[in-house]
Amino acid sequence: MSEQRILVIDDDHELCELVTEYVSAEGFDIDTVHDGETGLSQALAGDYALVLLDVMLPGANGFEVLSRLRKTSNLPVIMLTARGDDVDRIVGLEMGADDYLPKPFNPRELVARVRAILRRADAPADGRALIEVGDVRLDSGARTVSVNDDELRVTAVEFEVLERLLRAAGSIVSREQLTRDVLDREYSALDRAIDMHVSNLRKKLGAEYEGAERIKTVRGVGYVYTLPRSESPEESA
């Protein structure tokens, strides 16, 4: 089944063998590639549900592969980074990775991250199919987002973060709740994933609408999607 095919792009042959052995036992089909250029070509040409992408690769490195992939594809990507290298994690998320996993990792954690991302990508419509807040329109059935009728390219995780913020527009959504709902894990103060996904959404949506910040940060708590003046309770009362 196409939804079970995963591409691993990593030049560590032993790690690829271990990932293949463990993840295949969990019901996934695994293909492995050991350099960036070949990995990119295969990711674009193959029918994959997700890519596991190492940062350090011969030829084109993981960031180059991700950048070129994101020009035409929203294929979910989990970056594999060196443990403790926060810069690589932040850069990967800024460039459109859905999540990251530091090496060395527990195979069970890898499978949990993969399943969490695939659930996001395949999530069915929840409640109202269409959500419109100001000039933003989100269709949870078609999995599309548009601003002023111009469709945006967003990742599966960005879509889920935005959907939760729009459904709660005008109210605070905590980082803890977003992390649990979207990434299927408990929030850690060192985990910047949600913050980076929100940052990416701000860039794609536009930082402001009607002179107000679209997504406000509530320091130490979380985020709130600002209701346009025309939709605020004060204006409609």
Image (cartoon, grey):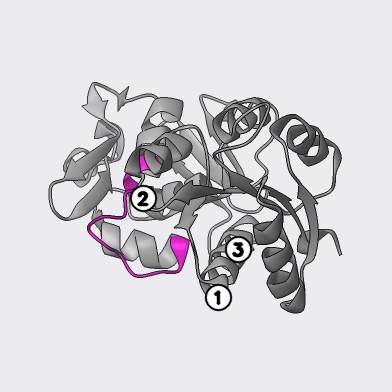
Disc on res. 108: 1
**Residue interval drawn in magenta:** 183-196
Residue assigned mark 2: 194
Q: Earlier in the sequence, mark 3 or mark 1?
A: 1
Measure the alpha-carbon separation of dots 2 and 3: 17 Å
Measure the alpha-carbon separation of dots 3 and 1: 10 Å
Mark 3, secondary structure of its residue: helix
**Rendered image quadrant of residue 124:** bottom right
Mark 2, secondary structure of its residue: helix
Tally of numbered discs: 3
For the residues bearing labels 2 and 3, Cβ distance under 8 angstroms: no
Residue assigned mark 3: 114
Q: Residues within 10 Å of mark 2 (few under 14, many from 20)?
A: many
Per the picture, the main secondary structure of the magenta-coloured stretch is loop
Q: Percent from the top left, x then y, of residue 191? A: 31, 55
Q: What residue is shown at x 25% (from left), y 47% (from top)?
A: 224
